[in-house]
Image: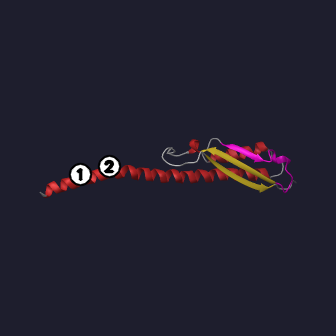
Amino acid sequence: MRSRFLACERGAESAESVVALPLIVIVIFTGLEYGWLALRSLQVDAAARAGARQAALAGIGASDVEDAVSNALRRSGINSGTVTITPADPAQAEAGDVVSVEVAVTYADVGLVGLGGLMPLPESLTGRAAMVREPGP
């Protein structure tokens, strides 16, 4: 009688495991994906900040700013992004003017697991930074 009871308990534990295990795996991967999202967002912000630092220097043009952003993204393992600089040519900005850099990256290109169908993820990550243009020499 006791062995029959234990066999029944083991069957119930197996059924509970079959139900619970996929849910636990989804929760773990969701946590990983959102952690990855936060990391990538910080990396895109850092790239925008690197571009704004370049844009604030006297004599620096738009191509130099785009190179600084591309290098920062590449160091983070991000291969592409869209860079918007205001004003379009920072070399034309006067000392004391604010120059801003916006970097946009498609999240599907940098996502970790690709759980976009199961959880709300952004379409793109955007980083913005602004600095005051420094006076020239």
Residue 135 appears at what percent x and percent y? 86, 56
Identify the residue at horizontal 22%, vertical 55% (top origin): 9
Q: Is residue 88 magenta?
A: yes
Mark 2 vs mark 1: which is more N-terminal?
1
98 left or right of 36 in image = right
41 left or right of 89 in image = left
Three-letter code, disc 2 = Val
Residue 18 appears at what percent x and percent y? 32, 49
Q: Is residue 133 magenta?
A: no
Q: Disc 2 on helix, strand or loop?
A: helix
Residue that protrudes farthest toward the left in the picture: 1
Check the picture and name the quadrant holding the N terminus: bottom left
Q: Disc 1 on helix, strand or loop?
A: helix
Question: 35 or 50: which is nearer to us?
Answer: 35
Identify the residue at horizontal 72%, vertical 54% (top origin): 129
Question: 45 or 69: which is nearer to us?
Answer: 45
Identify the residue at horizontal 48%, vertical 46% (top origin): 118
61 left or right of 123 in image = right
1 left or right of 81 in image = left
| Measured Cα–Cα span from mark 2 to mark 1 | 11 Å
Q: Which residue is mark 1?
A: 11
- Crowding around mark 2 (Cα neighbors within 10 Å: few <14, some 14 to 19, many 20+) is few
Q: Which mark is residue 18?
A: 2
Residue 88 appears at what percent x and percent y? 79, 45
Q: Which residues are magenta?
A: 81-97
